[in-house]
Amino acid sequence: MDNKILSHQQIQHKTRRIAYQIYEANVAEKEIVIAGIEGGGLHFAKKIQNILRKITEADILLCKVYMNKSNPLASGVTTSMAEQDYKNKSVVLVDDVLNSGTTLIYGVHHFLKTPLKQLKTAVLVNRNHKKYPVKADYKGISLSTSLQEHVHVKFQAKNDMVYLD
């Protein structure tokens, strides 16, 4: 863990900035759906949700997104919310790291099957190894890393961190 990229304090700052950007893009909305991809994405989504609840009177709904990250086609994508609960709403799909774009593109594909007001994406770490045409609308940090390097995000009480190995 010598290769720390973001400290707990830096992650808090970036999360707050992303939450404010989401709020600014949805200032007129009565409800905002924060859809966290199971794992680190869900942890990050909860952090964004907590900040949004403090800065807006809109209902901030948390939607859990489930998929087999190594083979999203095999099991498909499911959510904790029924389709009618996010239909015609503003949705932000959240993951911790955008690496190849596979997880995010399958998540986006799932939500595009339903009419939405808007669909945006948010990630804490954006890497530049995409094999799909997907981008993060909101990102904490962009990193140029080699394919051999791995970005790890650890969400622990008062000790969140991002590091490279």
Image (cartoon, rainbow, N blue to C red):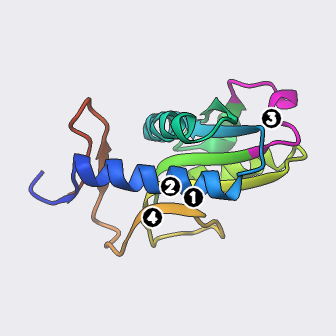
The x, y position of residue 95, in whole percent, is: 51, 47
Residue lying at 78% horizontally and 38% vertically, measured from the top left: 30
Badge 1: residue crowd in 10 Å (few <14, some 14–19, many ≥20): some
Region rendered in magenta: 79-90
Q: Which numbered marker is on residue 153?
A: none
Identify the residue under disc 3: 86
Identify the residue under disc 2: 18
The alpha-carbon separation of the residues under discs 3 and 2 comes to 21 Å
Please tell me whether mark 4 or mark 1 is closer to you in this view: 1
Please tell me whether mark 4 or mark 3 is closer to you in this view: 3
Of residue 95 and residue 74, the one placed in the foreground of this image is 95
The alpha-carbon separation of the residues under discs 4 and 3 comes to 26 Å
Left or right: where 141 falls relative to 116: left
The alpha-carbon separation of the residues under discs 3 and 1 comes to 20 Å
Identify the residue under disc 4: 126
The x, y position of residue 55, in whole percent, is: 55, 42
Badge 2: residue crowd in 10 Å (few <14, some 14–19, many ≥20): many
Badge 4: residue crowd in 10 Å (few <14, some 14–19, many ≥20): many
Assess whether mark 2 and mark 1 are in contact (beta carbons under 8 angstroms).
yes
Left or right: where 9 falls relative to 120: left
Please tell me whether mark 2 or mark 4 is closer to you in this view: 2
Against 63, residue 154 (above or below) is: below
